[in-house]
Image: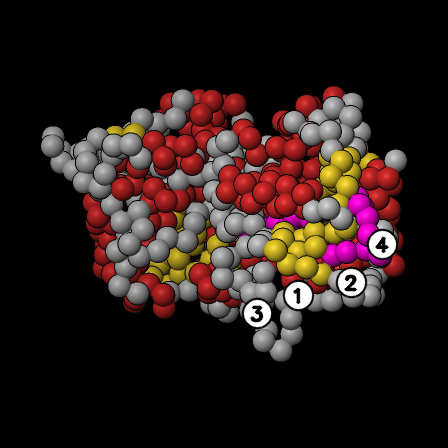
Amino acid sequence: MTVFILVAGAFTGPYVWRDTAARLVAEGAEVHTVALTGLGGRPAEPGEAVDLETHIADVLAVIDSVVVESGGDIVLVGHDYGIHPALGAADRRARSVARIVHLDSGMPRDGVPALAAVPDQRLREELTEGGGVQEGQAGELPPPARDAWPRWGSTAGLSEAQLDGLTALAAPQPLGTLLQPLRLTGAVAAVPVTGVLCTGNGPGIELVQLMVDLGEPAIQALADPRVTFFELPTGHWPMLSCPAELAEALTDAAAGRGHRLKPADAAEPPPHLRPFLLDVPERPRERTGNTDLYLPEGPGPHPAVVFVHGGPVPAGARPTPRDWPTFTGYARYVAGHGAVAATVDHRLHAFTDYGRAAEDVAAAVERVRADPRVDADRIALWFFSGGGPLTADWLAAPPAWLRCLAANYPILAPLPSWGVAEARFHPVRAVARAGKLPIVLVRAGREMAEIAATVEEFLTAARRCGADVEVVDVPEGRHGFETLGPTEEARDAVRRAVGAVLTRLTT
């Protein structure tokens, strides 16, 4: 018999599992929900410091009772914060746990507190900076108000009644549970893992595969054959929004089913390093700092197109993005058509890095404009993928010299799981202030659902305010279509997009 042990996330308790647990039981499984101290379990004693170790002990008690009473195959499920005590307990009972399920949760590491995984960046800063709370400090974090739950994850899929219930039953989170670092011996690494990704809240399987392809060591471990994945098209609380679908995914996970990621193949380049889809000749290139210039024929001054890569890209990724075939290919193509092209490396290494990435891009743009071979009054900026949020600054206050802003398969609103609290990097909101700035948007017809939703939201906002947007559709195109196998449709899309941008630079 499969035995599921379910550990709820921040502010919540066993009650959130009611419908999912009932489905699992109906399918013949045994189900235990962990009542964490102060969160549906026993109340804390006066003066007791409830911390992560307290909650790990709560999970261990359930594991040990199951081992004694039933001896079934234990599948330990941790949602949100709940993955931290679940992993801590599994590390100490690795031989008793058959599989760990990360339910819309992060990848906790040894020595890192749960606070690091809290999606609300502003809250993290409040708790750690300027004399904020420290590990070992007593106290509680009040539960979210009804309209504040999105700070902790997308509420997509929740009915008004469910949101009311979530709010009414929420309990304060003991601060020690967020601040005490997780301690792992490494034994838990031997336990098979499943990730259930809620695409209404964060990345889906395809985007995780792209992150594996980029070579981040921590992400590479997700391509282990013992790791499987499922997607649910909902927000951060699937046990409430789609309990039947969640129960089905958990049952399949227990059986070892699910999608497996493809590991990096040393004999085959990953998609982002495959050849550009157009055969473009070499052009003269000059490198200064984080910026490469590709030069057209003639002395100039020429209009210029600055290409801005997406991300996050691991800090140690080599080659860096300005040497990836997509960007060198676009740059050579543009230079061959009479404009200076610039490719830029910036420091978007995590979702919290948009501020410093914006600084890098702004500095590179000024460096390009200062070059005597560049017409400083005719500049286009072209953003890709996760670089989409960086468009917000330029949309909100477009300078007179910015003649066009382009974006390929962009993310145009921060995903809820990113923890990007600043309204600054939200193009959907910024487009209302774009005025007459021409925008060229290259839309992939087979885009990931979580990204496509932000594009449609942006286009709706653009229509509402009358923004000048030209959409170049690639109906069969996927995210990063330029290096995913050349097709005539994709080649035509590149030509049309470049033509649209250059037309706006020269008129």
Q: Which label number is shown at residue 264?
A: 3
Q: Which mark is in front, 3 or 1?
A: 1
Say whether residue 310 is magenta. Answer: yes
Segment tinted magenta in the rendering? 294-312
Q: Which label number is shown at residue 283?
A: 2
The residue tagged 4 is 298
Task: Pick whichever of labels 1 and 4 is earlier in the sequence.
Answer: 1
Q: CA distance from mark 1 to mark 4?
A: 31 Å
Judging from the image, what secondary structure is the residue with disc 4 in? loop
Looking at this rendering, what residue extends furthest in the left direction?
Answer: 47
Task: Pick whichever of labels 2 and 3 is earlier in the sequence.
Answer: 3
Task: Pick whichever of labels 4 and 3 is earlier in the sequence.
Answer: 3
Q: Position of residue 69 (x, y in %)?
A: 25, 57
Q: Which mark is in front, 2 or 4?
A: 4
The residue tagged 1 is 273
Q: Nearer the viewer, residue 462 or 240?
A: 462
Residue at the spot 37% in from the left edge and 44% down from the top edge: 116
